[in-house]
Image (cartoon, rainbow, N blue to C red):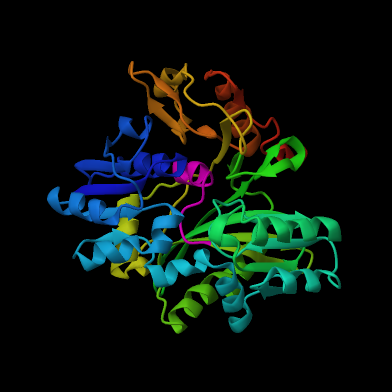
Amino acid sequence: MKVLIVGGGGREHAIAWKVAQSPKVEKLYCAPGNAGIAEVAECVDIGVMEFDRLVTFARENTVDLTIVAPDDPLAAGAVDAFEAAGLRAFGPRKNAAILEGSKAFSKDLMKKYGIPTASYETFDSAEAALAYLEQAKMPIVLKADGLALGKGVLICNTLKEAKMGVQTLMLDKQFGIAGNRIVIEEFMTGREVSVLSFVDGKNIRVMTSAQDHKRAKDGDQGLNTGGMGTFSPSPFYTKEIDDFCRKYIYQPTVDAMRAENREFKGIIFFGLMLTKDGPRVLEYNARFGDPETQVVLPRMKNDIVEVFEACIDGTLDQVELEFADNAAVCVVLASDGYPEHYEKGYPILGLERFTKADGYYVFHAGSKWDANGAIVTNGGRVLGVTATGSNLKEARARAYEATKWVEFENKYMRQDIGKAIDEM
């Protein structure tokens, strides 16, 4: 079969790498892709929001399955566009992708169906939000309602910070229309855990757990980013927690979406906070996480194309997910200055070492070819260096070892990804 992947980051490279292993796949395309994805797929110069061009390409090239990976095209109805043209596509339709596309919607859904989460209020005006803050308990969390590249969440320790946050989101429009409405919610404490799942509208199959590091600098300092590294599995995600989440969070979320006539088929990413009072939902994403995908898929044993098709066909109850009894750690190599100001276009050296090293992977997030055919940096997050090991400590040591294989000017990374593992 012929498969098209929509997207061009580290998540899409990991998906493409996994899809390419399926014996069902004879031809793999990616739009727009990147220099790393091009090793396993034919890259097509079409943007992720160019639905008409994507559909035309899929039809003209007799594509059997399209996988829509990023949040923006999902929220805007990319899957609907493919289905309207009679083409198979993996991912939630627009009316289901709202689970991620609107924080207010997801919070209201959880409240209505009794899914555990932080208490909150929603505001459409800065004036009302500022008035609420005057009597709110600090610290507090401000969230842009819409999509903001994973960065529209502000943790405010003081009233002054919270007021500045409202200014940033609602008045200065740092995240555009995503901040037209905001959610203000209680600050929860505990371990954060990410759990990805496949959903076919009725059934859910939970993948292995992971834990992300969002802040730019060591010690969880600095600005929020799209993710500076991750590890899998999370040692803090116990069987007891898993049992609780399956009963009170995972299946109830799928059932709630069905009850709202928003049948969800695709990936639900559960961002959890393990509080002293039990697990609570921090957020939902309607797609694979980035960089969580880079540690989850290398551990997955299943043919991912078969799982995608089961989600589309509503037969996920016939699938049992299998993951290797090992661990994986991903360290993101970024351009110094990310997520604010950084330079691009620097040659990337040392990538060839990964082709000969078992259990080591490099997933391209921001790379391209220059005019001379060299692979150069083309983004804030450039590469995700992933390694597997028999346990998390071994995987972490191997991942950091592999970061030394790659060089480019202004290379930056956190030195403490998974540090909690070493302290256990």
* Image spot of residue 243 (x, y percent): 61, 68
**Residue 393 position (above or below residue 57):** above
* Image spot of residue 252 (x, y percent): 54, 76
Residue at 62 percent of width and 44 percent of height: 225
Q: In the rendered image, which quarter contains the C terminus?
A: top right
Residue at 52 percent of width and 20 percent of height: 406
* Image spot of residue 233 (x, y percent): 59, 47
Q: Nearer the viewer, residue 77 or 270?
A: 77
Q: Nearer the viewer, residue 217 or 345?
A: 345
Q: Is residue 298 magenta?
A: yes
Horizontal side of residue 400 vs 83, given as left or right: right
* Image spot of residue 24 (x, y percent): 22, 47
Magenta range is 285-299
**Which quadrant of the structure image shows residue 35?**
top left
Horizontal side of residue 115 vs 128, given as left or right: left
Q: Nearer the viewer, residue 9 or 370?
A: 370
Q: Is residue 412 magenta?
A: no
**Residue 264 position (above or below residue 52):** below
Horizontal side of residue 325 vs 73, given as left or right: right
| Whether residue 269 can be seen here | yes
Residue at 28 percent of width and 68 percent of height: 313
Total residue callouts: 0
Horizontal side of residue 248 vs 54, given as left or right: right
| Whether residue 387 can be seen here | no
Residue at 50 percent of width and 33 percent of height: 379
